Image: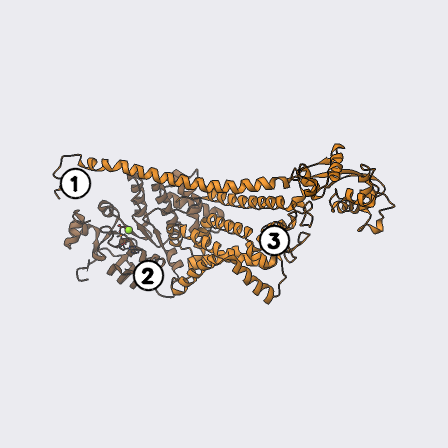
Chain colours: A brown, B orange
Amino acid sequence: MNDMRLTQRTDVSQTKIAAQHVDVHYGTTHAIKDVSVEIGDRLVTAFIGPSGCGKSTFLRCLNRMNDTVASARVTGRITLDGEDIYAPSVDPVQLRARVGMVFQKPNPFPKSIYENVAYGPKIHGLARNRAELDGIVERSLRRAALWEEVKDRLQAPGTGLSGGQQQRLCIARAIATEPEVLLMDEPCSALDPIATAQVEELIDELRQTYAVIIVTHSMQQAARVSQRTAFFHLGHLVEYGETGQIFTNPRDPRTESYISGRIG
Amino acid sequence: MADTPLYGADSPAGSVIDRIRPGLAARRRKELRLKIYGLVAMGIAFGMLALLIGSLVFTGWRAFTQTHVTLDVFLDPAEIRAETLPRGGFDSVLEASLLQYFPEATERAERREVMGILSNGAQFILRDRVVADPSLIGQTIRVTVPTSDSYDQLRKGLIDRETPERLRRLNDAQVERFDRLEAAGVVSQPLNWALLRNADSRFPELAGLRGALVGSFWLLLICFLISFPLGIAAAIYLEEFAPKNRVSDLIEVNINNLAAVPSVVFGLLGLAVFINWFGMPRSAPIVGGMVLALMTLPTIIIATRAALKAVPPSIREAALGVGASRQQVVFGHVLPLAMPGILTGTIIGLAQALGETAPLLLIGMNAFITSAPDGPFQAATALPTQIFIWADSPERGFVSRTSAAILVLLSFLIAMNALAIFLRQRFQRTW
Ligand SMILES: Nc1ncnc2c1ncn2[C@@H]1O[C@H](COP(=O)(O)OP(=O)(O)OP(=O)(O)O)[C@@H](O)[C@H]1O
Ligand SMILES: [Mg+2]
């Protein structure tokens, strides 16, 4: 698209994920239209845009979750550390261990809180023994700001938690495998301001080691936690750049009107 | 937008309520009518059921007790010898014991008539006791043996003493003799355990369901062992792994068709393929179980697929999202969550199989077999075919036994369905 302008980057950050001319179709619906973007490592990138513009769809391309949707067709090239993730040699299982995901709707397993967090490390064989696994579970729950609330009932079912607690449980589950990239689809939509602040703190901390992509409907949140912001509209990536620049000095009139609350 | 009211811009406020109100009474009447239709339908259904069970209980309850005579029998060593044990001698000692009550019966014909009070099987009951403990020979032992069917009917009031003698199955002398036994206090009518303990017999007072129960057990076991793993495997493949294309659509349609094929056709198939072609034994539960498995398979596949579909996709996504393989997703998450539904479907399928008659008739499981099978390769009957055999028998005693057998079959079916409901309630999840 000619209206897609990549900003000249001021900070030096390696590219973790690069997408080139990505299109996604759901049957006849053209959900993502020729999106090219470079996601920096050790940065938080926010995806913003009105409902239905394709944020979740694009996010799900980055760990090949769209493979599970029969009608979805993804074209274009997406690389992780320079390697094409849609290449036949790439195992989606391994990819998803490297690129973790927190879904828009909290979806804990109907198992115990402990089992929820321990599941990823278990299936990938990351813990050598029970004590190590216990440690991983505790650290993950602490980072997800849930430990204090659940430490006495780790064997209680994860589905018995409140909506916000469930979402933090899903965050703990996603970070328990130490992914290199964490995709978060509106992780705070069910959280109260205190939990939101905790999750934002977590995101900031994760940035030290990972690349984080967060979809959000809250402009304030995007401004608070992200260094880069991408604005999607009707399947197009309209504008992508430094968060500060996007919010203070957007180049595209659509970005401007969305941020100021006129589209959406 | 400066909104104008959608309704009655020209009429005063409250117009929405004014428009709704006149229709309310009609809506409520409609609802009431629907409720009444529902209640009537339920009433009819339950009435039918009550009628069925009621008539079965009415004719069948008498078969749950059996008239017996208790005798002190002297096991005369002159009549019974160890070397002739499996055979004769037992009728003579029984006769000697019974004749004590009828000293006047000296004629051979009369003595035969007296012996007619006891079931033909009485001597075998006595024999089995002696075979089990040969040291009894020479002693006097007390045995309780069933009477023959006519006297059983007499005591249960099914033979009316008021009917003229020539229209009655027992003449006046026979009735009078039985009354004397009764007066002597040796006649009793205990619970009829033989109904469950004995296999089939020509004599109604000896006939029981043991052979049919064991036969049905083997049938269901084989049916389950074949159809459960195959059904689940097929359903998992179709639901989770098969590409969605023309071929899988065709398979889906055909599985649904298979579920609708009349059972008699499966019986013919079993006869043609398993017995005539593979040369498997006739009347054997192994063949019956395989035929029933073919019938149950589509039921289990359909139930399993429905249960797998009912697992919310978010659970699959969650597992895939942390890097589980498809196999791990299915066996670690989806299948456990679907298990209650699968088990419910399986039990309902097995309950259907338990009551299935036509295919078993075709493969010869309605043979007259007087012992319970030792394994799935021996000829046997099953509960429904036993009912079929008894319903077809002319002896009066089989009438109540048929109803009793139906009640036994129904109680198994009800127990299985109750188990299915219990499983569904117990493991039902909400997401
Ligand atoms: N599984 C699907 N099948 C068909 N169409 C889909 C599917 N998922 C999404 N779409 C369509 O793709 C478009 C983008 O959807 P997407 O979920 O990516 O939006 P979104 O930006 O995440 O919206 P929101 O902010 O409401 O979550 C929408 O028009 C939607 O209808
Ligand atoms: Mg979304």
What amino acid type is highlighted by mark number 2?
Answer: Asp
Which residue is denoted by mark 2 in the rendering?
Answer: A81
Splitting the image into four quadrants, where does ligand 1 fall?
bottom left
Q: Chain of mark 1?
A: B
As drawn, which residue projects farthest toward the bottom? B277
What residue appears at the point 44 percent right and 54 percent down from the top-left corner? Answer: B305
B139 up-or-down from B203: above or below: above
Q: Are marks 1 and 2 on the same chain?
A: no
Residue B226 in sight? no
What residue appears at the point 47 percent right and 40 percent down from the top-left corner? Answer: B46
The label shown at residue B339 is none
Which residue is denoted by mark 3 in the rendering?
Answer: B218
- Tell me which numbered mark, 3 or 1, is placed earlier along the sequence: 1
Tell whether B302 sits left or right of B103.
left
What amino acid type is highlighted by mark number 1?
Answer: Tyr
Image quarter hosting the C terminus of chain B: top left
Which residue is denoted by mark 1 in the rendering?
Answer: B7
Number of callouts: 3
Q: Alpha-carbon distance for marks 1 and 2?
A: 61 Å
Helix, strand or loop under label 2:
loop
Helix, strand or loop under label 3:
helix
Q: Chain of mark 2?
A: A
Q: Quadrant of residue B97?
A: top right
Residue B413 in sight? yes
Q: Alpha-carbon distance for marks 3 and 1?
A: 71 Å
**Mark 2 neighbour class, 10 Å CA radius: few under 14, some 14 to 19, many 20 or more:** few
Q: Nearer the viewer, mark 3 or mark 1?
A: 1
Q: From the top left corner, tell me how far across and down residue B195 is, in percent.
A: 65, 44
Q: Quadrant of residue A232?
A: bottom left
Image quarter hosting the N terminus of chain B: top left
